[in-house]
Image (tube, grey):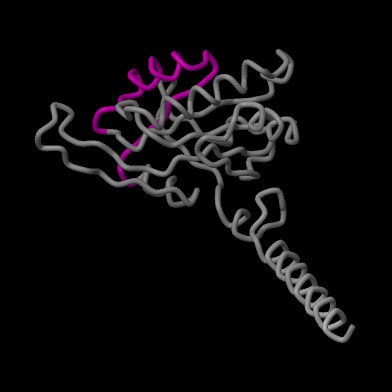
């Protein structure tokens, strides 16, 4: 009998310890759905880069939700995948919802990505998408502001000459121009739609 009680007590203590660990892990884990998360509110902000229409600022789209992706047109796989996800998400929205969303593509490869090339590339994914870039200094400032990164990688044995390693996230910016959500690479279109609708 005593052994049974001891075993039961040990099981209860183990269960309580496991529950405490789960609760602690939940409370301490970062949650992207927390709009007051301090780190997110330190990131983002207005920027001005060059599009085919000339100087274009994030602030030009206040009153709309902006869906932003940072990459480059020579990217072999990551950028096309993410931009295709954004495109599908926009297609899954109702027409009146799409009117309130502005997709943006910022290139970190201004050496090769002219505003004209960016316009052609962006239009392939969605007719509303605007491609933008700027000087290295302007691009670096914008990238740092959004907590992204990129680095040029020389490829001496390739006709491309170099590639660009970069972070891959979709940044959702609310109608007041504030960074509201970052979505990791591989986020499905339905989740992108759900997050956009929260901001409409």
Name the quadrant containing residue 38: bottom right
Q: With respect to residue 40, does 102 lie above or below?
A: above
Q: Quadrant of the N terminus?
A: bottom right
Whether residue 188 appears in magenta in the rendering, the answer is: no
Rendered residue at 43%/52% (across/down): 144
x and y percentages locating residue 88 in the rendered image:
58, 19
For the image shown, how many numbered marks are present on the structure?
0
Residue furthest to the bottom in view is 2
x and y percentages locating residue 42 in the rendered image:
58, 57
Look at the image and give the residue range highlighted in magenta. Answer: 111-137
Rendered residue at 57%/40% (across/down): 183
x and y percentages locating residue 71 in the rendered image:
39, 35
In-image side of 33 versus 90 (left or right): right
Q: With respect to residue 143, does 6 lie above or below?
A: below
In-image side of 43 versus 138 (left or right): right
x and y percentages locating residue 182 in the rendered image:
58, 43
Residue furthest to the right in view is 1
Q: With respect to residue 127, does 104 lie above or below?
A: below
């Amino acid at each position: 009998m005593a052994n049974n009680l001891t075993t039961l007590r040990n099981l209860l203590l183990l269960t309580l310890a496991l529950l405490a660990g789960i609760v602690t892990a939940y409370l301490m884990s970062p949650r992207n759905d927390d709009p007051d998360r301090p780190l997110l509110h330190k990131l983002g902000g207005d920027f001005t880069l060059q599009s085919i229409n000339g100087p274009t600022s994030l602030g030009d789209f206040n009153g709309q939700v902006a869906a932003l992706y940072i990459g480059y047109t020579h990217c072999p796989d990551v950028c096309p995948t993410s931009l295709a996800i954004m495109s599908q998400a926009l297609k899954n929205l109702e027409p009146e919802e799409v009117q309130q969303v502005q997709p943006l593509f910022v290139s970190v490869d201004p050496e090769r990505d002219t505003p004209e090339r960016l316009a052609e590339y962006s239009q392939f994914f969605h007719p509303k998408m605007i491609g933008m870039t700027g000087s290295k200094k302007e691009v670096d400032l914008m990238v740092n502001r959004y907590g992204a990164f990129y680095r040029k990688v020389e490829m001496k044995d390739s006709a491309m000459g170099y590639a660009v390693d970069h972070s891959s996230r979709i940044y959702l910016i609310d109608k007041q121009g504030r960074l509201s959500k970052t979505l990791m690479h591989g986020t499905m279109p339905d989740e992108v739609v759900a997050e956009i609708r929260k901001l409409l």
